[in-house]
Image (spheres, rainbow, N blue to C red):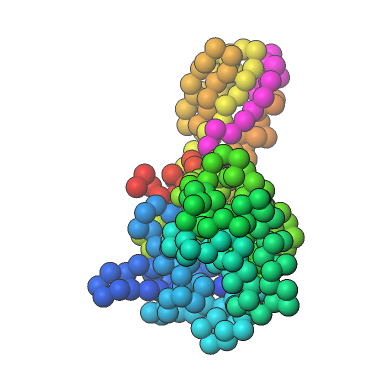
Amino acid sequence: MSDVVTPDNPTVEARDLSRWFGQKVAVSEVTCGFGPGVTGLLGPNGAGKTTLLRMLTGLVRPSAGTVTILGVDPRAKADVYRNVALVPEDEHVPGFLTAQEFVQFNATLQRLGDPAGAAARALDIVDLTDVAGRDLSTFSKGMRQRAKVASALVHDPDVLFLDEPLNGTDPVQRAHLIKLFVDLGAQGKTVIVSSHVLGEVERMADRVVAMVDGRLAGVGTITALRNAMSDIPRKLRIECDQPRVLAGTLIGRAYVGGVEVEDSALNVDVLDSDVFGRELASIAVGGGVRLVSVEPRDESLESTFRYLVGGR
């Protein structure tokens, strides 16, 4: 999958990136890039994604390898942070500050001309205007998450790192934030979302970087990752008017690994999807079978990730 590891003109890039803590290797020789749009950074607990995120943002020094953001090393040229923001997973926020004060403080640190106005606009984006005067200590976890997002957006960064940004949010809040992140990606922002909630990442990410045991397990679009796993049968569900007749014509063909018949459909394990796609229509016509639909059963991010991690 080397052709999809790094996008054209990446805004964030890691080269042979490693980090170890004593004898523990947290990240090992990771090379990947991130460009405009939303990219999901996925991995089970202990996969190394948080350490990778901290190295990408310059919070942790790599043991080996290099990181660039917008073409520069963030640890060498701090000015790049005027175009970068991070929403950390950590829950630590100053509870004695109001939401307005919290976001405005970051606007002041960014030396914006109108910090109060910028803070008000950012809070409006995350739908916290009505509670902007309340102390953060009175907020629910989901509301604190949105306040952190507002603080990150206050200076309109080009690159946004998000570490589990949907933690604690209710369904309405999640839908609102997902739409916000998708819209930011569509505007040309680079949005990198670290998450373990596959379904939510699938709703917002154009691209996925999957990690297991500190190494890359796969990089690319969900479709590209699944297509690259040519040694794993593709699972298709075919609805038709005569599933048993169609099953009988498919069994025994070299590119079919297995067939399971249901009432009005059959599930097929396909070993060569290109040949299967070319021949299915003629097979159906020859057997007098009317096809209703052909749909993949394993194109979701969850099933693709399960293949990548090998059941871990």
* Relative vertical location of residue 254 with respect to residue 194 in this rendering, above or below: above
State the image coordinates of residue 116 (x, y, percent, origin top left): 69, 69
State the image coordinates of residue 252 (x, y, percent, origin top left): 49, 25
Residue at point 66% right, 58% down? 123
State the image coordinates of residue 169 (x, y, percent, origin top left): 52, 46
Left/right placement of residue 235 relative to residue 112 reads left
**Magenta region:** 283-298
Residue at point 64% right, 28% down? 294
> Which of 80/18 is in front?
80
Based on the displayed image, in which of its 4 quarters is residue 161 positioned?
bottom right
Q: Is residue 164 visible?
A: no
Based on the displayed image, in which of its 4 quarters is residue 150 positioned?
bottom right
State the image coordinates of residue 239 (x, y, percent, origin top left): 62, 20
Q: Can residue 50 be seen in this view?
A: yes
Count how many numbered circles sit on residues in the image: 0
Q: Is residue 296 magenta?
A: yes
Q: Does the magenta stretch include residue 56?
A: no
Left/right placement of residue 294 relative to residue 49 reads right
* Relative vertical location of residue 181 with respect to residue 247 in this rendering, above or below: below
Q: Residue furthest bottom?
A: 76
> Which of 243/180 is in front?
180
Residue at point 61% right, 57% down? 133
> Which of 275/294 is in front?
294
- Image quarter where the N terminus lies is bottom right
Left/right placement of residue 64 relative to residue 13 reads left
